[in-house]
């Protein structure tokens, strides 16, 4: 789910990128003064995300060494950086580039918890398993994700206890072009060990929870759909953590059901 946006200190360039950043819900606000600029990171739908900032500066000093990565850590808005004029007698200019990913970083990459089926009782078929060729291939950031083949409107349940840190359900667009990837509806839940679960492609107005809610395993959290980068209705389920603002690490997970415990998920099979 890599996202990348580029901004420069020109009014024309800012206008060209305005529509794209408004659609994702992630954006940087520039507060310019006589001797510099403050960059404020804002998110409409998520409070746990990771940002990497790069910049080229002329006669400006950054508030911290560049490039750098920072976690939102529960904030929907925060000061990302300040660039200040170095020599008051010389003109200053700046270009900056930021990249964001859902979720936060953690020191461990272990994932030893049990996960429940993210639906009600029954058996469910895998549409695309880990390392699937459509969108779970190596380098996709979804290598260990599972796409469950369910009709639009199917009730989605929390697969593990946690806190809701991301909710979007206002998107109405979908398609098979990767450009639709950041435009899907979702619920993101943070677990006690710092891992995150992404429940993606929810139907429009399909969320049943809000940011800050504590949820328990089996609790309904949304309704499945086909928004974003999707060819048909399904639930994209992934356990992950951020590496930086450019990459996430999808983690293998153990699914415990009434029919058994599973760690491998094969396309076309039911679990």
Image (cartoon, grey):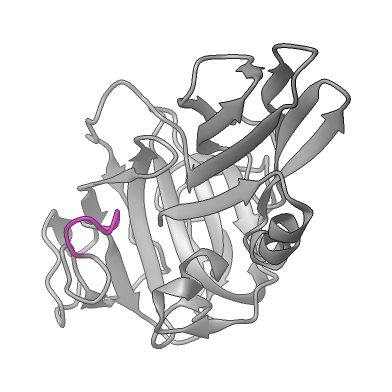
Q: Tell me if 209 is positioned left or right of 30 in this view.
A: left
Q: Residue at x 46, y 33 (%)?
A: 104
The residue nearer to you, when weighing 244 against 97, is: 97
Provide residue 92's location: percent of width, then percent of height.
71, 27
Provide residue 130's location: percent of width, then percent of height.
18, 63
In the rendered image, residue 235 lying in the magenta stretch gets the answer no
Provide residue 19's location: percent of width, then percent of height.
71, 67
Q: Residue at x 22, y 34 (%)?
A: 112
Magenta segment main secondary structure: loop
Q: Tell me if 2 is positioned left or right of 111 in this view.
A: right
Give the farthest residue toward the top.
Answer: 87
Q: Residue at x 75, y 19 (%)?
A: 90
The residue nearer to you, when weighing 75 against 190, is: 75
* Magenta region: 137-142
Q: Residue at x 49, y 74 (%)?
A: 180
In which quadrant of the rendered image does the C terminus lie? bottom left
Provide residue 15's location: percent of width, then percent of height.
75, 62
The count of marks equals 0
User: Looking at the image, is 136 positioned above or below residue 245?
Assistant: below
In which quadrant of the rendered image does the N terminus lie? bottom left
User: Looking at the image, is 68 positioned above or below residue 211?
Assistant: above
User: Looking at the image, is 184 positioned above or below residue 213?
Assistant: below
């Amino acid at each position: 789910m890599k996202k990348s946006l580029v901004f420069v200190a020109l009014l024309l360039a800012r206008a060209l990128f305005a529509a794209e950043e408004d659609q994702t819900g992630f954006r940087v606000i520039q507060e310019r003064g006589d001797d510099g600029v403050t960059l404020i990171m804002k998110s409409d739908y998520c409070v746990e995300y990771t940002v990497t900032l790069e910049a080229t500066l002329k006669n400006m000093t950054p508030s911290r060494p560049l490039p750098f990565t920072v976690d939102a850590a529960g904030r929907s808005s925060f000061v990302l950086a300040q660039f200040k004029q170095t020599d008051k007698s010389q003109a200053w200019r700046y270009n900056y580039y930021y990249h964001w990913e859902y979720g936060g970083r953690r020191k461990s990459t272990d994932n030893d918890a049990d996960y429940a089926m993210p639906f009600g009782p029954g058996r469910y078929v895998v549409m695309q398993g880990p390392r699937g060729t459509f969108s779970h291939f190596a380098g996709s950031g979804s290598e260990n994700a599972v796409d469950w083949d369910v009709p639009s409107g199917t009730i989605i349940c929390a697969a593990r206890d946690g806190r809701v840190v991301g909710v979007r359900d206002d998107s109405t667009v979908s398609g098979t072009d990767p450009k639709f990837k950041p435009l899907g509806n979702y619920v993101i839940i943070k677990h006690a060990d710092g891992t995150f679960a992404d429940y993606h492609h929810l139907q429009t107005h399909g969320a049943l929870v809000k940011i800050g809610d504590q949820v328990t395993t089996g609790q309904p959290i949304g309704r499945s759909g086909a928004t974003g980068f999707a060819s048909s209705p399904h639930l994209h389920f992934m356990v992950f953590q951020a590496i930086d603002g450019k990459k996430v690490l999808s983690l293998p997970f153990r699914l415990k059901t009434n029919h058994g415990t599973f760690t491998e998920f094969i396309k076309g099979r039911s679990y």
